[in-house]
């Protein structure tokens, strides 16, 4: 399907709150909402799909756009379907279940295109999104928040979009998470209710989050209880219950996070029983993961993503590679068979410990991982006359950051492989990289999170400085 080019519109008479009006949806927004234009004013409509004609009602008018809801649909998209999840409309974890999967892949390709057209000076080839054969039950990790329901019932689930309303998932489960995660989380909530284990509220300390992670084979499961105090009531009884109920559980931890922060981890972790880590097998590699270690939530697509990153690096066996934001060393080790040397770094000590353990197990003696900031370490290595030929970065949604981008411009690798989870920050960083002489060859979207509006993209940037005197 052809991806439409971006259009620019002038602002004219703004819509008014409560106003009903016809609207044709042109494309999808970064949060999965449909976007149309009424008298050249951009209108965002949750639940609308490209190509649909709707009658909308204005909910809110902002400076540069309006937000509307669907009153009714005049012409539905042929790709529209009934969302199979019973709590889809209130949960907010997924945004695109009402669209057939093939349409989701096209929309994600368009999201990458839109970002480059809006923020970057150069629009590279945007390739078709690489999807999954089965776009369900792919998440290998769940992080359900806890709360108190009616009559003291323990609830666990996700917060509804833009609210502090907890959507209880213990009975319905989550259709994009592996079933074993749902089963174990529900069992823990029942245990907490029966044994009167407190949940964290504004008035009491207790369990904040139940984190369950399973490897691709579901042969090893790791459970972490995150609390707001150092105490975990009925700790021994809970461990005994989990061990006797689920043979798959190989690792149980307690993490204390007493800060009022949306971040799940950030405190101290104590192993209660079992192994320190669980093991993931991906192709020829094995990765050991502690509770705090970052790992791709979609194991099946992770190998596809890393293969694309490796293709983008164009390694010949002679290159020195830096894996910035290395996490457990996954991308760096993936590239190690075709690299002369690999160095990686991360700010989470547990991840670095896992990464070096993974390198040793893989027999990659030429791969080493360090605790610290990429921008600081690479400048120090440059002073020691060590400079990478290829840098690969898989940053958080906020992007690479100005410090790292400046360092890339100073170190000047031949290639920079950007593995992005946010098209907007990717395109903004591309504009910054252009000033340093880096040009994107192409963008390869990879669907790591089916049913959601999130999309990853691999973009190789090549160093081609402009000749002196040329503008």
Image (spheres, helix red, strand yellow):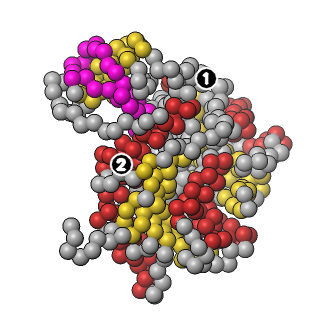
User: Residue at coordinates 37% horizontally, 17% vertically from top-left?
Assistant: 53
Query: Which stretch is magenta?
Result: 15-39
Report if residue 422 is visible in the image: no
Q: Is residue 128 above or below residue 398?
A: above
Residue 133 image position (x, y, % from top left): 66, 38
- Which quadrant of the view contains residue 447? top right
Q: Is residue 73 above or below residue 124?
A: above
**Label 2, label 1: how far apart the Cα atoms are:** 33 Å
Residue 333 lies in the magenta stretch: no
Front of the two marks 2 and 1: 2
Which quarter of the rendered picture does the C terminus lie within? bottom left
Report if residue 48 is visible in the image: yes
At label 2, counting other C-alpha atoms closer than 10 Å, the crowd grade (few under 14, some 14-19, many 20 or more) is many
| Residue nearer the viewer, 462 or 449 | 462
User: Residue at coordinates 54% horizontally, 73% vertically from top-left?
Assistant: 321
| Residue nearer the viewer, 127 or 94 | 127
Residue 378 image position (x, y, % from top left): 44, 76
| Residue nearer the viewer, 403 or 202 | 403
Q: Is residue 218 above or below residue 277?
A: above
User: Residue at coordinates 39% horizontally, 53% vertically from top-left?
Assistant: 124
Per the image, the residue denoted by label 1 is 84
Mark closer to the chain start, 2 or 1:
1
Per the image, the residue denoted by label 2 is 116
Q: Is residue 213 above or below residue 338?
A: above
Residue 349 image position (x, y, % from top left): 57, 67
User: Residue at coordinates 24% horizontally, 37% vertically from top-left?
Assistant: 8
- Label 2 sits on a secondary structure element that is helix
Compared across the picture, whether 261 is left or right of 220 comes to: left
| Residue nearer the viewer, 387 or 231 | 387
Residue 226 image position (x, y, % from top left): 60, 47
Q: Which mark is residue 222?
A: none
């Amino acid at each position: 399907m052809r991806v439409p080019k971006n259009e620019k519109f002038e602002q004219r008479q703004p819509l008014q709150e409560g106003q009903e009006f016809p609207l044709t949806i042109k494309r999808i927004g970064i949060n999965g909402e449909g976007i149309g234009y009424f008298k050249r004013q951009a209108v965002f409509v949750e639940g609308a799909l490209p190509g649909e004609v709707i009658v909308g009602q204005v909910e809110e008018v902002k400076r540069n756009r309006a937000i509307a809801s669907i009153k009714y649909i005049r012409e539905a998209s042929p790709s529209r379907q009934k969302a199979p999840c019973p709590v889809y409309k209130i949960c907010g974890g997924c945004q695109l279940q009402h669209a057939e999967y093939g349409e989701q892949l096209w929309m994600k390709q368009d999201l990458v295109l839109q970002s480059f057209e809006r923020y970057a000076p150069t629009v590279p080839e945007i390739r078709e999104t690489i999807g999954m054969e089965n776009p369900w039950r792919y998440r290998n990790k769940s992080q359900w928040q806890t709360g108190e329901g009616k009559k003291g019932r323990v609830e666990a689930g996700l917060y509804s979009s833009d609210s502090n309303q907890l959507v209880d998932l213990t009975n319905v489960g989550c259709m994009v998470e592996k079933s074993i995660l749902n089963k174990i989380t529900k069992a823990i909530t029942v245990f907490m209710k029966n044994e009167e284990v407190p949940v964290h509220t504004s008035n009491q300390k207790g369990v904040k989050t139940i984190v369950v992670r399973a490897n691709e084979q579901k042969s090893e499961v790791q459970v972490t209880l995150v609390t707001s105090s150092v105490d975990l009531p009925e700790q021994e009884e809970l461990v005994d219950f989990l061990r006797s109920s689920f043979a798959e559980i190989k690792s149980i931890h307690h993490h204390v996070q007493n800060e009022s922060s949306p971040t799940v981890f950030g405190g101290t972790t104590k192993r209660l029983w079992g192994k320190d880590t669980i093991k993931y097998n991906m192709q020829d590699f094995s990765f050991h993961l502690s509770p705090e270690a970052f790992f791709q939530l979609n194991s099946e697509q992770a190998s596809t993503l890393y293969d694309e990153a490796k293709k983008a690096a164009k390694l010949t066996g002679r290159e020195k590679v830096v894996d910035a934001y290395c996490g457990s060393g996954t991308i760096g080790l993936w590239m190690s068979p075709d690299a002369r040397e690999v160095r990686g770094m991360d700010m989470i000590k547990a991840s670095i410990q896992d990464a070096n353990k993974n390198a040793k197990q893989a027999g990659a003696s030429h791969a080493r991982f360090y605790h610290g900031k990429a921008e600081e370490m690479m400048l120090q290595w440059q002073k020691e006359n060590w400079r990478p030929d290829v840098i690969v970065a898989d940053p958080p949604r906020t992007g690479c950051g100005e410090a790292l981008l400046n360092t890339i411009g100073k170190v000047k690798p031949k290639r920079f492989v950007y593995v992005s989870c946010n098209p907007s920050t990717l395109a903004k960083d591309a504009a910054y990289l252009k000033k340093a002489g880096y040009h994107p060859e192409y963008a390869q979207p990879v669907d790591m999170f089916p049913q959601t509006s999130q999309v990853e993209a691999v973009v190789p940037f090549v160093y081609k400085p402009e000749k002196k005197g040329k503008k």
